[in-house]
Image (tube, grey):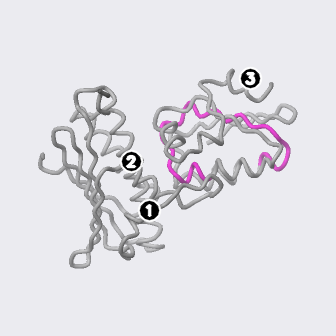
Amino acid sequence: MTDPDIVEIPARLGAVAQLADYLKASCAAAEVAPQAAIDLELALVEAANNIILHGYAGRSDGTIRLAVRQGHGVVELDLTDLGIPMEDGQMTMCRTFSLEAESGRGIQIIQSCIDVIDYHRNAGVNCLSLKKFFDPSTPTGNPVPG
Amino acid sequence: MTIITLDGDLAIIKVTAARLDAAAGPAFKADIQAQLNGRAKRVLLDMGDVSFMDSTGLGVLVSLLKMLGKDGALAVAGAQPSVRRLFELTRLDTVFSLTDNVDSARAVLGD
């Protein structure tokens, strides 16, 4: 894995696009498969939104730090914040998509887009790690069948 | 962030923002609610300029579909790969009619 690229934003919904832009640039530089880059952006944005809306819950002084690590066929995102932690198991709990709900799909989207999810709290810092694998030899990043 | 054109009971909504996300979603929802206000039963949503949508943006589209009622219809035109991926992940591609372009969306809506 490469040394991490790190960026930090204020915990505001309007700043989340900066994280996404940073990730896209990092993925483009590392020639990450487009489909994998799309999934990473979808997951990153949902994770950041959750931190802002639920972790910081109205606080205006929070920050979110993103570290991006690249390896051969893998991208790892580490998000850290100082907000209210999620309950144990929230990030990995099995959920189903509702076709009628107007909200509440964020964690399911993360679960659908990401291969390995780890969430823990260390010395007051919430740490969410999202790992995505892809096949660098195919345009989509998906393994070739057969 | 929207241009809305009414033609009988058909509303054509052109989303001009590049991102339909948690930052933009609430204003987008308020805008379409205020402008449609029960005047349309069919909606053509032109998303060709939207390069990214998150679950909040998707939730606004679900609320729009509900607003149209059980006799309403909504077709999405020109969804870019990331937007289409979100519809597919959430299985909402089975609820919304996704079409490649505005002409195809018009056909789906019987226009």
Mark 3 to mark 2 CA distance (whole Å): 33 Å
Across and down, in percent, residue B42 comes to 79, 37
Amino acid bearing label 3: Ala
| Residue B39 lies in the magenta stretch | yes
Across and down, in percent, residue A29 comes to 22, 34
Mark 2 lies on residue? A113
Marks 3 and 2: same chain?
Answer: no
Residue B17 is left or right of residue A40, and the answer is right
| Chain-order first, disc 2 or disc 1 | 1
Amino acid bearing label 1: Cys
Mark 2 to mark 1 CA distance (whole Å): 14 Å
- Helix, strand or loop at label 2? It is helix
* Residue A94 circle label: 1
Amino acid bearing label 2: Cys
Task: Report the chain holding disc 1.
Answer: A
Mark 2 neighbour class, 10 Å CA radius: few under 14, some 14 to 19, many 20 or more: many
Mark 1 neighbour class, 10 Å CA radius: few under 14, some 14 to 19, many 20 or more: few
The mark lying in front, picked from 3 and 1, is 1
Mark 3 lies on residue? B107
Bounds of the magenta segment: B35-59
Closest to the observer, A13 or A85: A85
Across and down, in percent, residue B36 comes to 79, 46
**Residue at horizontal 42 percent and vertical 47 percent from the top:** A42
